[in-house]
Amino acid sequence: MLGERRWAALAGSGAMRSYRPREFMLQQGEKGGFLLALTSGRVKVLASERDGSEVLLSLRGPGDLVGEMAANRHSHRTATVQALDHCTACFMLRPDFDRFLLEQDAQAEFADYLVAKLSETVPYQIHQVHFSPRQRIARLLLEVVRLADPSHPNRWRVPFSQEGLASALGLARSTVAEQLGVLRSGGVLGPGPRIVVADVRALAGLAGAVTRE
């Protein structure tokens, strides 16, 4: 939404930080005051339930912001952000970010971005409630690989376990295992145990999406 020039200016306006896979970048309930601009890697956005379980809200990748919903220092995080890959991000205090928006005349783009992301306060599984289990799994796998950096050495590997997919989609683990088996036997996924996309066009077809590769 910013374009390459303004995104480069944003990435150069704060301090770069790096995160390991599975490391928590932001945690629900913590105080705000800053946001992160993702420059590499994929993350998952999670919300904790009262029973201690976690639900997937969204996936984000390079070019996205995280923590923007609670960037003011008096607010609290409404979700947890966890790295799926080795990630790098630009750390920005809210006053510095506001200054960037003013200097780059980007307030309108940021407002549009917030509107687009507000739908992600609804759990990911609810967005897919009308799809079959196979289509729900295919759509999530497709989104994960599409967010990967094209130069990533394991671009087609999906950094989710069967349990993680089941939790994200509100499906039984046995259902996920069965559907992954079908996708493997059809050549859409490579042989296990890791989940690796072997035929992205076939996966997109199952997901009901248009291929971009």
Image: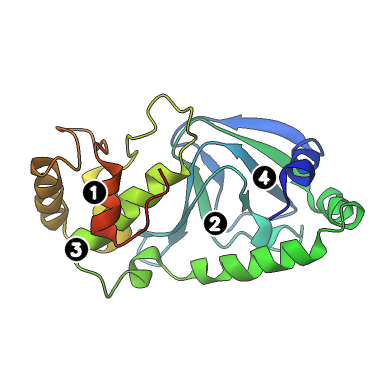
Furthest toward the top, the residue is: 153
Residue 104 position, x and y percent, is 87, 52
- Asked if 89 appears above or below 31 in the picture, the reply is above
Name the amino acid type tagged 2.
Answer: Gln
Q: Which disc is residue 28 wearing? A: 2
Question: Helix or strand or loop: what does disc 4 sit on?
Answer: strand
Q: Could you tell me the amino acid type at mark 4?
A: Ala
Distance from Cα at disc 1 to Cα at disc 3: 16 Å
Which image quadrant: the N terminus? bottom right
Camera-near label (4 vs 2) is 4
Residue 181 vs residue 73, the one in the foreground: 181
Work out whether mark 3 precedes mark 4 in sequence or the reverse, and give the earlier one. Answer: 4
Residue 13 visible? The answer is yes
Spatial CA distance of label 4 from label 2 is: 18 Å
Q: Mark 3 = which residue?
A: 133
Q: Residues within 10 Å of mark 1 (few under 14, many from 20)?
A: some
Looking at the image, which residue is at 73% across and 68% down? 111
Judging depth in this view, the residue of 52 and 61 nearest the camera is: 61
Q: How many residues crowd mark 3 within 10 Å: few (<14), some (14–19), many (20+)?
A: some
Q: Left or right of 85: which side holds 51?
A: left
Determine whether, in the image, residue 15 is placed left or right of residue 31. right
Do we see residue 167 in this rendering? no
- The Cα–Cα distance between marks 2 and 3, rounded to whole angstroms, is 29 Å
Amino acid type at mark 1: Ala
Secondary element under disc 1, as helix, strand or loop, is helix
**Residue type, numbered disc 3:** Pro
Residue corresponding to mark 1: 202
